[in-house]
Amino acid sequence: MNQLPFLPFTKPSIDEATIAAVGDVLRSGWITTGPQCQQLESALSELFGGRPVRCFANGTATMEVALRVAGIGPGDEVITTPISWVSTANVILTVGAKPVFVDIDLSTRNLNLELVKAAITPATKAIMPVYLSGLPVDIDQLYEIADHYQLRVIEDAAQALGSHWQGNLIGSSHQHRSDLVSFSFQANKNMTSIEGGCLVMNHADEANLAQRLRLQGVTRTGLDGMEVDVLGGKHNMTDVNAVIGIHQLAQLSEFMVKRKALVKHYFQLFEQSKLIEYGVILPLADMHHSNWHMFQVLLPIEQLKTRNQNRSTVMQALKDQGIGTGAHYPIITDFKLYKNLGYQSTNTPVAQQVGQAILTLPLFPLMTNQDVERVVHSLENVFAQFH
């Protein structure tokens, strides 16, 4: 029987100052969208080099609003990846457009930009790449394609707050193109507001439209003036969530340092183990661009099948040893909703393979090197038993 405490695959770092700040907001009497939300937006705008930012109730709303800001709707096509949280594709359907799934690169597990051009049709209006685990696609190549075909780019950077491309923060536009960029602050992200997200935009007109779309299309003037000129939703962030985000943002750099140190230890231990020999594939060891939102390996599924094992049995064996894992993500086109729309996972074979094999191992700032050692040794023991 395992005597060690359960190690989840992720856990937020919430300090006492943050907890106290939430209490202050609750006592203030203003708990919905207000001054804390505005303060968080200002801090994020500064982080992204002065670009306009609006915060939302979650990182799904940010992508839906981004599509609407870009004018995408019925009859339009949006190119994206089939390996993501399903919301990436769902929001495209929500605005009445069609997701076009392009296969991924096995090394980065992101959208294969070499295949994107062949998927572009006269109906294509945007590309929506996903930065899986915080690793961005080749931003230069992405925008070369977008500029050539006059397409909008909606960067699903839900997992990529703090990630960089060629020295520039994702979401900023100092030395490279950047269009609409969506971030999530959900509980498992590198910075959390429990639930929430933000959208980074190009200019004030887009920000004003996003703000109206955030709350029923309403524009207020004076004490009693109100106008509605667009159909909006109910996507506003509360000040309770915002104050958590403010405190988390201040600690983001510290969180990043801890994550990268843990990841380096993971790589060292994997190299010393027999797991590579067993067929486990490591993520790309990119310490310059990724924020290391997750540490994900690919399991040797075909080898496991010959021993009547699969990802689920590996996860269960680790759980029995007190270690939590995740599967991020199953291929979207295998869900019934998308099968019923005519999508087939066999059309994107690399994504199909990754969706079956990917395994998320524990990674969060509160972990220690000993926790990493426990994970790797436990996984090695599991495979030794299977062999």
Image (cartoon, rainbow, N blue to C red):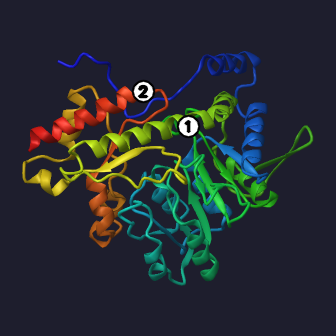
- Left or right: 16 with respect to 129? right
Mark 2: few/some/many CA within 10 Å (<14, 14-19, 20+): some
Q: Please, is residue 200 above or below residue 254 in the view?
A: below
Q: Secondary structure at mark 1?
A: helix
Does label 1 or label 2 sit earlier along the sequence? 1
Mark 1, residue position: 257
Of residues 304 and 127, the one drawn nearer to the viewer in this rendering = 304
Q: Could you say where residue 262 lies in the image, as x and y percent from the top left?
A: 44, 36
CA gap between label 1 and label 2 equals: 13 Å
Residue at image point 62% right, 37% down: 253
Q: How far across and how far down the image is residue 263, in percent?
A: 43, 41
Q: Position of residue 246 (x, y in %)?
A: 69, 32
Image-quadrant location for residue 385: top left
Which picture quadrant has residue 273?
Answer: top left
Question: Helix, strand or loop at disc 2?
Answer: loop
Above-or-below relation of 269 to 166: above
| Residue position marked by numbered label 2 in the rendering | 368
Query: Between residues 340 and 3, which one lies in front from this camera angle?
Result: 3
Is 241 rendered above or below residue 18?
A: below
